[in-house]
Image (cartoon, rainbow, N blue to C red):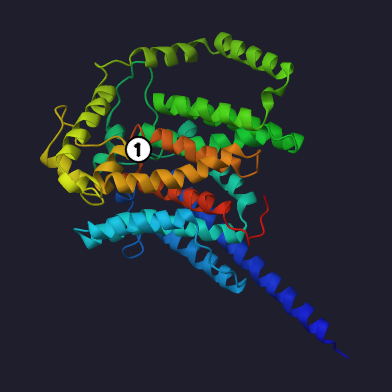
Amino acid sequence: MILEKDIISFYNSKKIIRNDIFIRISGFFLAILIFFAVNLPPSDLIPIKFGPFTLNVAATLMLLFFTLISFLSKRYQVELSSADISMIGISCIVLVNMSDIKQVMLFYFMFIALPYLTGKFLVYQNVGLILKRIIGYSGIIQTLIILFKPFTFEASTSRGLFWQMSTQTAGGGYREVGSIGHPIVLATLLLPSFICWLDTLLDSSAKKTEKILSGIFTCLILYSIFLTYSRGAWISLIVATFAILIKRRVFKNTKSYIFATLGALALVVLGGDLVTSISDRFAALNMNDGSLSHRSYMFAWTWDHLSKMNSNFLIGIGYYQSYPLLKSDVPPDGFAVMDNTFLTLIIELGLLGLFFFVFIVGKILMNLKLKYRKDTFITIIIISFLMQGFSFDMFSWEGCCIFLWLLIGYQANNTEMKSVERSF
């Protein structure tokens, strides 16, 4: 005779299996999305599209679809976090200043709002344990492209500027662009992988073979980031490394200091040419350097336009409207680019939009005050992205933008949701 408890047990087992399938499918599309973001060139260089959707957006939509199905099957209640409220505030500013609905739908909802929402629902999926592996291996694939160069892309737009340049840097080397087409963007997308492998290397619970593999991959990605000759990325890498070392409490004894000192000395002795290239690259950092002079001028350019906005300085001129403004008022050096994510934010979304963004980021950074958690590496990745935001406009690069907002949506909600069972 079948008892009622047997029926309930059978039903629950079927439910677990069904949820497990959804988690596996979500993990698959999460891997596809991050692989696309880290390794595909700008979407305007790829002819493959699904109607109005690029490969990145299509992967994000599929990921959101299956995370929502899993969410509904588990009968969770939607929890509105303070970060969600800030995102609603940003969305309201975007809609109020909307001048072109097509641009708003394409550049805001598909590249920012959609990834954020997907990241939020990924918290319910409990995919934290596989997220580090996905990010790590996606960077290794890009590293193999850099080292072996199995193919090249023909640049058809201004995004391929660095593909058309073969000039030497002040440090004496050609700036590697990988499959992305821009050295700074390439370095930005490699930093998360470096952080993941270094964090695994320093994990005391990791197996010996895992540590060896992590050490090899860390060195390979470190070398690839060096080849970009991106000074900002080098600084971000140092900050991220120290953040991991501190949170992992590596320097809690004298032995660690000794090994760190010996490692630094070995790097100077064995990597003499490498160290010389880095020092030469930083030595060229002066106002005669085009990148520094342009970025410095853009602060004055932004302040000048903010002072002319009257009441619009609170909500900006509208999302993705800085580029028409740059074309009408081109900087003296002729480069009509902001080259700074935060300046773009303040021009397009005003002081209020910048406040909402800083509030969301601040909620995430508060996690660093806690003891080390297995998701701390995500916070450090977000810090590396934000530091790179002073070097270029991340929101104008689809892969970077979707990757960043996916992690922001995940981490901003990860600590606030009380009803979610976590693997961390």
**Foreground: 241 or 270?**
241
Q: Measuring 73% from the left and 38% from the top, which residue is drawn there?
A: 206
In screen coordinates, is 254 left or right of 120? right
Kindly give the residue lying farthest to the right in the view shown. 1
Farthest residue toward the bottom? Answer: 1
**Quadrant holding the N terminus:** bottom right
Q: Position of residue 242 (x, y in %)?
A: 57, 26
Name the residue tied to disc 1: 181
Q: Does residue 154 show up? A: yes
Which residue is outermost to the left? Answer: 328
Q: Residue at x 40, y 29 (%)?
A: 176
Q: Nearer the viewer, residue 220 or 289?
A: 289
Point out residue 18 in the picture as x, y percentages from the top left corner.
65, 72
Label 1: which secondary element: loop
The foreground one among 413 and 36 is 413
In percent of width and height, residue 346 lies at: 28, 42
Looking at the image, how many numbered discs can be counted on the residues? 1
- Does residue 300 lie above or below 130 as drawn? above
Crowding at mark 1 (Cα within 10 Å: few <14, some 14-19, many 20+): many
> Hey, which quadrant is residue 204 in on the image?
top right
**Is 417 positioned to the left or the right of 149 in the image?**
right
In this rendering, would 134 be left or right of 8?
left
Q: Identify residue type, mark 1.
A: Gly
Q: Position of residue 48 (x, y in %)?
A: 35, 57
* Quadrant position of residue 15: bottom right
Q: Residue at x 60, y 73 (%)?
A: 73
Residue 142 in view: no
